[in-house]
Image (cartoon, rainbow, N blue to C red):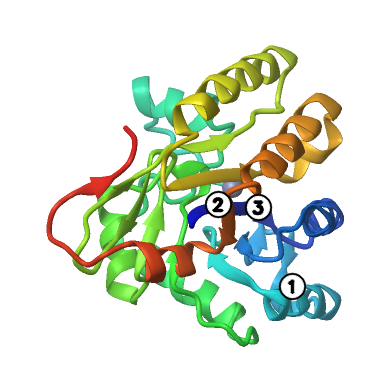
Amino acid sequence: MRALVVSVHDVSPLTQANCDKIIEALRSLGVSEGSLLIIPNHHSKAPVRDNAAFKNWISDRVQQGYEPVLHGYYHARTPKPTDAGITKFTTQVYTAGEGEFFDLDRDEAISRLQMGIEDLAFLERKLNGFVAPAWLLGYEAEAAVRKVGFSYITNVGSVKVFEGVHNYYSRSLVWSTRAPWRRMVSLAWNQGLISRLRDKPLLRIGIHPADCEIPAVWSHVKSLVTAALQDRQPLSYEKFIANHVKPTSVEVGDSR
Ligand SMILES: [Zn+2]
């Protein structure tokens, strides 16, 4: 059976209420498995480590079938005085300053990854995946992710499994809610994308906490999930990789 991977992004104590609403709605639609992208200390304001209520809540979700995935440490990138040109545009404008792992050096990336692993060590399921905030992962930071022992990463266009397979191409559906014009563009873009992805083995749906606050976006997300469940099995990334990605040394996938 073809696969549906639903991932909930930016899961942290700051977004817990919305994430809970999203996960409950997914459950009522028939999704009980997926991937949760967790931020260990969101914007340096919400350390998971010190938050027993959040730990209980996320442990329950993981027990119910959700895979925990590390999603940066702070999520935000500290702007540098030397930022200019395309770097400035990419990190500060395009992503609203959220590309924490865009240009970390290897040692700093390793130290943040290890802090994240330690902070989430209370979970009963091991972290195997890493998704960079804003999907921006620099070369050095990617080397760090590999060195620390993660087995896969995702970005907007692919799932990258380190062992054997280079890239499994599959474009993720993801909505923008930051401004009305972005919402309109993302609704239209996703509608176009879904028709191209309909017959592919993997459909990826990425949901952000704010998506459930915008009625047009939220109803679009739910209608696409409902339609996908007609002939797709909901899985976490981890399970999708285990069940569907054959070890090979060539690039594979379904969509560019
Ligand atoms: Zn994020």
Q: Residue at x 81, y 74 (%)?
A: 57
* Residue corresponding to mark 3: 10
**Crowding at mark 3 (Cα within 10 Å: few <14, some 14-19, many 20+):** many
Relative placement, left or right, of 110 versus 70 is: left
Query: Whole-Å distance between the Cαs marked 2 and 3?
Result: 19 Å
Query: What numbered label is drawn on residue 101?
Result: none
Disc 3 under 8 Å from ligand 1? The reply is yes
Up-down relation of residue 217 to residue 109 (above or below): above
As helix, strand or loop, the secondary structure at mark 3 comes to: strand
Query: What numbered label is drawn on residue 4?
Result: 2
Viewer-nearest residue: 231 or 225: 231
Disc 2 under 8 Å from ligand 1? The reply is no
Relative placement, left or right, of 31 versus 153 is: right
Relative placement, left or right, of 166 versus 38 is: left
Labels 3 & 1 near each other (Cβ < 8 A): no
Viewer-nearest residue: 86 or 241: 241
* Residue corresponding to mark 1: 61
As helix, strand or loop, the secondary structure at mark 2 comes to: strand
